[in-house]
Image: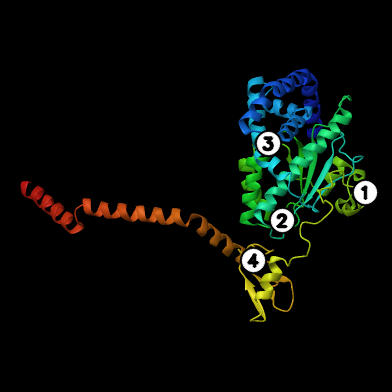
């Protein structure tokens, strides 16, 4: 129950801070509407529709409270943070509202009657292994956080008169389909640095499900850019711990709960949308690779290939079967050590070569500055002979 106790302590602390600073936040909202919004409108030459869209965001008390709390309720810092956030929203969110909404069937918000023990909504994100366009993925991440913020604003408006209005949400990330890809790490780093700070304090807890050692490299990168406060809200629970924390009645069958399957549950945010983004199914990267490899009966895929589902081990692709399998039928330690050595050399090759060059240069200069060994021996021999003669 350690995770449950941690979430409860944070929730009680958050609600205490909310009730203590609510009046200040409401005064801050009025200042933003009277002073900051007109300034930004003139600076960016906003249309009336854009200004009204910005005003709706400012009137979201929950969002303004989270930003003020991030800045320790210091008025000047909060006003500047909201101003910068407004400009960012117009440059990244407003410009995408006119385009069609992306379909994200791998993201599910559980029905409004389902929540964590503290009344906060639950969102499940299933990672996908298919190769997607980087721009589309970034746009989907922006749409995810913006939709989640709007949904929390609606819930807060409906429950603002209660003692425990929902200010945050719980996110479950299923890592079972996540593979090591350089582009994926770059996208995650971008989201952590550029997007999440624009929605401060919105996630009460992030549960990493089906985490294994193959995801350690990705987590190593992510935890370096996350602040300590955010790291304290990331959990790696076991199946038993997730059931104890959220209870089976609040989880779908895929994760050991009593709710119907995810695809049959109502989604109040409708992440999946009405139409899919891609009208016709596209072949996966593995299928395209296998289709191209028809010149031989089987093709061996590099252990470090981005399409290798068993990263670190050699994989074979049969030309007449659309599947990948381990080249040796099992995961051999020698193959993993060989891959680690290749990655180490690829990562530190320039540093090692530079160090070797510096060492060679130092040895050359050292040999030139010092007399040759033969000359040194002659000098020492003469010195010893002179000592004997004087005796």
Residue 299 shows in this picture: yes
Which tag, 3 or 4, sits closer to the chain's start? Answer: 3
CA separation in Å, label 3 and label 2: 25 Å
Which tag, 2 or 4, sits closer to the chain's start? Answer: 2
CA separation in Å, label 3 and label 4: 39 Å
> Is 349 left, or right, of 49 in this rendering?
left
CA separation in Å, label 1 and label 4: 38 Å
Residue 72, label in figure: none
Q: Marks 1 and 3: CB-CB under 8 Å?
A: no
Instruction: Say which of marks 3 and 4 sits in front.
Output: 3
Please name whichever residue, 338 or 188, is drawn nearer the observer in this view of the structure.
188
Residue 178, label in figure: 2
Residue 313, label in figure: 4
Instruction: Say which of marks 3 and 2 sits in front.
Output: 3
CA separation in Å, label 2 and label 4: 16 Å
> Is 385 left, or right, of 96 in this rendering?
left
Residue 198, label in figure: 3
Q: Marks 2 and 1: CB-CB under 8 Å?
A: no
Way the structure is coloured: rainbow
Q: What residue is disc 1 on? A: 259
Q: Marks 2 and 4: CB-CB under 8 Å?
A: no
CA separation in Å, label 2 and label 1: 25 Å
323 shown above or below 356: below
């Amino acid at each position: 129950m350690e995770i449950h106790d941690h979430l409860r302590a944070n929730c009680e602390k958050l609600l205490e801070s909310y009730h203590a600073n609510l009046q200040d936040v409401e005064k801050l909202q009025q200042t933003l509407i009277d002073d900051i919004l007109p300034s930004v409108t003139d600076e960016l030459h906003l249309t009336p529709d854009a200004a009204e869209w910005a005003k709706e965001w400012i009137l979201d008390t929950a969002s303004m409270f989270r930003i003020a709390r991030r800045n320790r309720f210091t008025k000047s810092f909060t006003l500047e943070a909201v101003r910068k956030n407004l400009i960012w929203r117009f440059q990244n969110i407003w410009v995408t509202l006119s385009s069609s909404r992306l379909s994200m069937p791998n993201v599910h918000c559980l029905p409004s009657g389902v929540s964590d023990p503290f009344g906060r909504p639950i969102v499940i994100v299933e990672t996908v292994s298919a190769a997607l366009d980087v721009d589309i993925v970034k746009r989907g991440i922006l749409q995810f956080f913006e939709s989640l913020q709007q949904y929390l604003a609606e819930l807060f408006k409906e429950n603002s008169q209660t003692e425990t209005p929902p200010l945050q949400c719980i996110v479950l990330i299923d890592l079972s389909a996540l593979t090591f890809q350089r582009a994926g790490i770059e996208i995650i780093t971008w989201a952590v640095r550029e997007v999440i700070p624009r929605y401060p304090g919105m996630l009460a807890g992030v549960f990493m499900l089906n985490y294994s050692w193959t995801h350690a490299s990705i987590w190593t990168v992510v935890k370096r850019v996350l602040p300590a406060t955010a790291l304290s809200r990331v959990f790696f629970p076991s199946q038993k711990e997730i059931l104890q924390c959220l209870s089976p009645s609040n989880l779908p069958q895929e994760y050991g709960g009593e709710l119907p399957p995810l695809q049959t549950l109502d989604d109040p945010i409708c992440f999946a949308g009405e139409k899919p983004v891609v009208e016709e199914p596209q072949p996966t990267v593995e299928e395209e690779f296998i289709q191209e490899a028809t010149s031989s009966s089987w093709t061996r895929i590099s252990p470090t290939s981005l399409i290798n589902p068993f990263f670190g081990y050699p994989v074979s692709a049969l030309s007449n079967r659309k599947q990948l399998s381990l080249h040796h039928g099992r995961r051999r330690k020698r193959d993993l050590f060989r891959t680690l050595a290749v990655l180490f050399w690829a990562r530190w090759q320039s540093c090692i070569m530079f160090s070797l060059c510096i060492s060679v240069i130092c040895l050359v200069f050292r040999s030139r500055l010092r007399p040759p060994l033969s000359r040194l021996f002659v000098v020492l021999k003469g010195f010893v002979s002179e000592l004997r003669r004087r005796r």
